Image: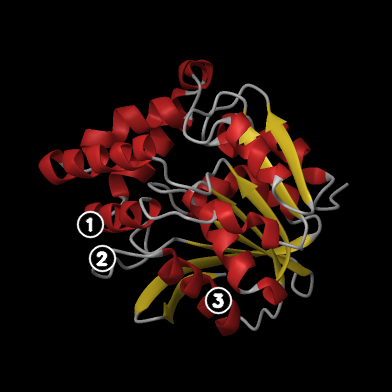
C-alpha cells in the first residue's frame, strides 16, 4: 500500500509492506535518497515486521516545504506519520539523515520507540562536516542536483560495487537527481545544526549502531564512540561497504541487523 499523507503542513509519500498485524518497523532514508533505497531489506524485514517507509520531506515523491528544516521538523514528521497509521510504538531504522532523525525521535519520544537501528550516521556537526554541507549546497545552487551526483556516489558506494553493478549505481544516481534541490539544501541546514552527541547517554532503549567499514561520512570509530556513550548501545560493522551500507552490501547489512531485530 502506498500513498501521500498530510503531515505538519506538507504531504509525505509513504509505502507499507509486510503482514498486517505484525510488529511495526519504520524506515527513514538518507539525504539525497528516497524510500526505494530500502528495497534490499524489505523481504528480509517482512519475515517479522509490518514496514512503514516514507520519503523524507524534500525527497522522492514527498513535498518540499520552504526551508531551512530542523531536526524537530523531521522528527515531527515521523510522529505525525505514526499517529496517522495508528502506530503507538515501533522499531525504527534510519540511515544517515534518517539515522539522525531516529536519534531525535528516541530522545524526544522514547515511549514510541521499541528499538532503534542507527546506520551510517553522526550525532554531532564538527566544523569540517558543516563546511562540507556548505560546499554541496553552494554547488547545487549553481549547478542543480547534477553537481553532487558524482561525489555522492563515490561516498555512498565502494568502487568495487560501482564497477560490478552499474545498473544499481545508476538507480542511486537517479535518486539523487530526483531529489528536490531546495529540499536537499533545507535538510542540509538541519545537518549543520546536528547536536545529539551530548544526549546519547540519556537513551535507555536498545540502540544498534551500524556502519560500513569504508564509510568516510560517518566513520566506524565515530559510530563506535556513539555506541559506547549509549547505555544499551551495540555496534556492528558491515564489511565491504561505504556510506549507503544497506545497498553496498545487502547481505552483510542484513546479517548485522538480524540478531538485534530478532529475525531468523
Name the front one of labels 1 and 2: 2
Nearest the viewer among 5 and 213 is 213
Q: Secondary structure at mark 2?
A: loop
Q: Check disc 1: other Cα within 10 Å, few if <14, some if 14-19, many if 20+.
A: many
Nearest the viewer among 238 and 172 is 238
Q: Residue furthest front?
A: 198
Q: Are marks 1 and 3 in contact (CB under 8 Å)?
A: no
Q: In the picture, residue 127 is in which quadrant?
A: top left
From the top left corner, tell me how far across and down residue 128 is, in percent: 35, 34
Instruction: Tell me: residue 138, above or below residue 168.
Output: below
Query: In the image, is 237 to the left or to the right of 162?
Result: right
Q: Which tag, 1 or 3, sits closer to the chain's start? A: 3
Q: Are marks 1 and 2 in contact (CB under 8 Å)?
A: yes
Instruction: Tell me: residue 69, above or below residue 88.
Output: above
Query: In the image, is 119 to the left or to the right of 63?
Result: right
Q: Which tag, 1 or 2, sits closer to the chain's start? A: 2
* Residue that badge 1 annotates: 182
* Residue that badge 2 annotates: 67
Q: Are marks 2 and 3 in contact (CB under 8 Å)?
A: no
Q: Which mark is residue 79?
A: 3
Q: Residue at x 47, y 34 (%)?
A: 217
From the top left corner, tell me how far across and down residue 203 is, in percent: 70, 61
Instruction: Tell me: residue 218, above or below residue 116.
Output: above
Q: Secondary structure at mark 3?
A: helix
Q: Residue furthest right?
A: 264
Q: Which tag, 2 or 3, sits closer to the chain's start? A: 2
From the top left corner, tell me how far across and down residue 61 is, in percent: 37, 62
Amino acid at each position: 500500500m502506498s500513498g501521500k499523507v498530510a503531515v505538519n503542513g506538507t504531504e509525505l509519500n509513504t509505502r507499507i509492506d509486510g503482514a498486517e498485524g505484525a510488529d511495526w518497523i519504520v524506515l527513514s532514508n538518507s539525504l539525497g535518497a528516497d524510500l526505494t533505497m530500502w528495497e534490499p531489506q524489505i523481504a528480509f524485514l517482512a519475515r517479522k515486521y509490518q514496514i512503514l517507509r516514507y520519503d523524507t520531506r524534500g525527497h522522492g515523491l514527498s513535498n518540499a516545504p520552504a526551508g531551512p528544516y530542523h531536526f524537530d521538523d523531521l522528527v515531527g514528521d515521523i510522529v505525525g506519520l505514526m499517529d496517522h497509521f495508528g502506530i503507538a510504538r515501533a522499531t525504527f531504522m534510519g540511515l544517515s539523515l534518517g539515522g539522525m532523525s531516529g536519534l531525535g525521535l528516541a530522545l524526544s519520544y522514547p515511549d514510541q520507540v521499541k528499538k532503534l537501528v542507527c546506520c551510517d550516521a553522526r550525532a554531532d556537526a564538527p566544523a569540517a562536516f558543516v563546511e562540507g554541507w556548505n560546499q554541496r549546497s553552494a554547488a547545487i545552487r549553481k549547478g542543480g542536483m547534477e553537481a553532487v551526483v558524482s561525489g555522492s556516489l563515490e561516498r555512498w558506494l565502494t568502487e568495487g560495487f560501482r564497477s560490478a553493478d552499474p545498473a544499481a549505481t545508476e538507480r542511486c544516481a537517479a535518486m539523487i537527481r530526483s531529489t528536490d534541490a531546495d529540499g536537499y539544501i533545507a535538510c542540509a541546514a538541519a545537518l549543520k545544526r546536528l547536536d545529539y552527541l551530548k544526549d546519547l547517554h540519556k537513551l535507555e532503549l536498545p540502540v544498534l549502531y551500524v556502519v560500513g567499514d569504508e564509510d568516510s561520512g560517518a566513520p566506524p570509530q565515530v559510530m563506535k564512540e556513539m555506541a559506547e556513550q549509549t547505555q544499551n548501545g551495540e555496534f556492528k560493522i558491515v564489511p565491504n561497504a561505504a556510506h549507503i551500507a544497506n545497498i553496498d552490501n545487502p547481505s552483510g547489512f542484513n546479517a548485522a541487523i538480524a540478531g538485534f531485530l530478532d529475525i531468523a
